[in-house]
Image (cartoon, rainbow, N blue to C red):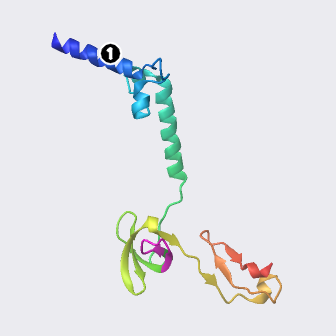
Amino acid sequence: SCSNVDKNISNFLLTYRNTPHSATGQPPAVMMYNRTLRSKLHQINPADAQRREDLQTDKERQLASRPTRKFEHDQPVYVQVSEDKTWKPATVMKRVGGNVYELLHEGRLIKKHADHIKKRTQPITGLQPGISGRNSNCNLDSIVDENSDILPNSDCN
């Protein structure tokens, strides 16, 4: 019947295209597509399935350990406003959607995805010289990092 002939030709061509050629040493599929064509053997190979499952769990672990990007109302941030990729100061006004925030930048409201926003640290001023225990001649301006730790200015070494 016609369907058996078509099936046999398809199977033959798949086998031929995945078999290394005597002249080149590589299968025609690799020469043309830079990969082997998938056959039924690829579906029953447990090593590939296990490798794929391991990669999936690694990816899930990476996503779970990634820090969350959440910003609060009136939080000072930096934002990429234009295509030049420079970071400009702005203030978070509200969360619009999943990872989209409305920001106040140079007197106007803009909406940006969290990928284009990063936390901005602000200096802490007004520390008493006797509290730090360092040289009283140093500049006591400090900054607060993302974990709310107070870091002394580099001038106070």
From the top left corner, tell me how far across and down residue 79 is, in percent.
47, 74
Q: Residue furthest top?
A: 1
Q: Residue at x 66, y 87 (%)?
A: 125
Q: Which residue is mark 1?
A: 12
| Element at label 1 | helix
Q: Which residues are magenta?
A: 79-89
Q: Quadrant of the N terminus?
A: top left
Say left or right for 84 vs 9: right
From the top left corner, tell me how far across and down residue 49 is, in percent.
46, 29
- Say if 7 sits above or below 87 in the image: above
Residue 155, image quadrant:
bottom right
Say left or right for 22 vs 124: left
What's under tag 1, amino acid-wise?
Phe
| Residue count near mark 1 (Cα–Cα under 10 Å), binned few <14, some 14–19, many ≥20 | few
| Foreground residue among 42 and 53 | 42
* Residue 88 seen in this snapshot: yes
* Residue 36 seen in this snapshot: no
Q: Is residue 87 magenta?
A: yes
* Label tally: 1
Q: Residue at x 53, y 46 (%)?
A: 61
- Say if 43 sits above or below 114 in the image: above
- Say if 50 sits above or below 63 in the image: above
Q: Quadrant of the C terminus?
A: bottom right
Q: Residue at x 40, y 28 (%)?
A: 29
Q: Is residue 92 magenta?
A: no
From the top left corner, tell me how far across and down residue 124 is, in percent.
64, 84
Say left or right for 132 vs 37: right
Q: Residue furthest left?
A: 1
Residue 114, image quadrant:
bottom left
Q: Residue at x 42, y 71 (%)?
A: 83
From the top left corner, tell me how far across and down residue 152 is, in percent.
72, 78
| Foreground residue among 115 and 152 | 115
